[in-house]
Amino acid sequence: MKRLAILTSGGDAPGMNAAIRAVARTALGNDIAPYAVYRGYEGLINGEIEPMSTLSVSGIINRGGTILRTSRCERFKTPEGQKAAAEILTKHEIDALIVIGGDGSMRGACALNELTGIKVAGLPGTIDNDIPGTDYSIGFDTAINTALGAIDRIRDTAHSHERVFVIEVMGRNNGHIAIEVAISGGAEAALIPEIELDMAGLSVKLDEWQKRGKRSCIVVVAEGAHRATDVEKFLRSTTGCDVRAVVLGYTQRGGSPTAFDRSLATRLGAYAVSRLIEGHSNEMAGIAGSHLCSVPISYVQSGSKPVDPDRVRLVESMAL
Ligand code: ADP
Ligand code: F6P
């Protein structure tokens, strides 16, 4: 393997830069020339590719976002788009490609492997933590800590004004962020897409809690389950509580990565390159417990990652 290209795709996630750094430096340490592809598959189709040096990745381990920039590229989903991208890789004599992103991005990597025979590897990079085959994806830990920081601040007003706050977090169509944030933020309830909403039940509980003297409540809602403003409207009309909605939105995607995400990204990046050197392809590097692992990308595409039912129950049992 002489030339290894790296790209980031889909939503940016804190820790992607640490992963890029680890991939580039591990490649250089093994006499492999790293190539940067800018703006995900969009940039690949357009030929936005250039060699990297040790200095290209200096001073980025602490930075959020991705220095390679990223995109969601509909054109790449078409046979013409994939053919154009494949031609760029061939033209630059790339032997292997590492894609940092979610499951959609990894599907794209497999398509390129089929077209070109170039070895591909995936690194799980998304705040959603919804990728099967890994306990954690790069960016999740930072996102939940960011959301937690916001909730801790909102708690002050919730308590002072004796209010219920409905806080909407990201997560696309799953509740991994919501559940983790609800547990660590001490929320009274988490509304997630995986579990049928019992809004009427929630109204009854809020009134009961208030009668028992609870001064404030935090309800975390996953964006895939409901809009916070709709929940706010419903709870205002069905309870005696003073309710406010907050949408945390893109604040969760930005910011300096936590130590956990930097370390995870560095370990996964180095590991993915070593697997490619050993001759493996079409794998995603992941973490199971405290050990790194590799799973076929076909497994990543085969299903969804369920939320842990014990954690869901824990949110309920802590809300007394
Ligand atoms: P994520 O990678 O976080 O799941 P997306 O699903 O938006 O995010 O995918 C990112 C990009 O990966 C898409 O914009 C597209 O270019 C590419 N992609 C997604 N799904 C496929 C697919 N089935 N085949 C080929 N490329 C895909
Ligand atoms: O996948 C990460 C994520 O932030 C989701 O939580 C969210 O639904 C989506 O991306 C938003 O995507 P976009 O940046 O395209 O609006």
Image (tube, rainbow, N blue to C red):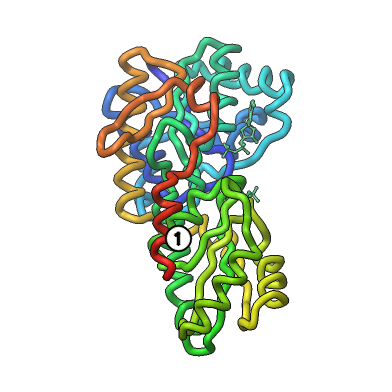
Q: Residue at x 71, y 72 (%)?
A: 233
Q: Amino acid at mark 1?
A: Glu
Q: Residue furthest bottom?
A: 160
Q: Residue at x 64, y 63 (%)?
A: 199
Q: Position of residue 20 (x, y in %)?
A: 41, 39
Q: Quadrant of the N terminus?
A: top left
Above or below 222: residue 96: above
Q: Foreground: 203 or 256?
A: 203
The number of discs equals 1
Quadrant of residue 9 within the rendered picture: top right
Q: Position of residue 257 (x, y in %)?
A: 39, 54
Q: Foreground: 21 or 207?
A: 207
Mark 1 residue element: helix
Badge 1 is on which residue?
Answer: 316
Rate crowding at label 1 as few (under 14), some (14 to 19) or many (20 or more) other CA atoms within 10 Å.
Answer: some
Query: Seen in the image, is 319 located left or right of residue 301?
Result: left
Q: Residue at x 40, y 35 (%)?
A: 134
Q: Quadrant of ligand 1?
A: top right
Quadrant of residue 148 within the rendered picture: bottom left
Q: Position of residue 174 (x, y in %)?
A: 56, 46
Quadrant of residue 42 within the rendered picture: top right
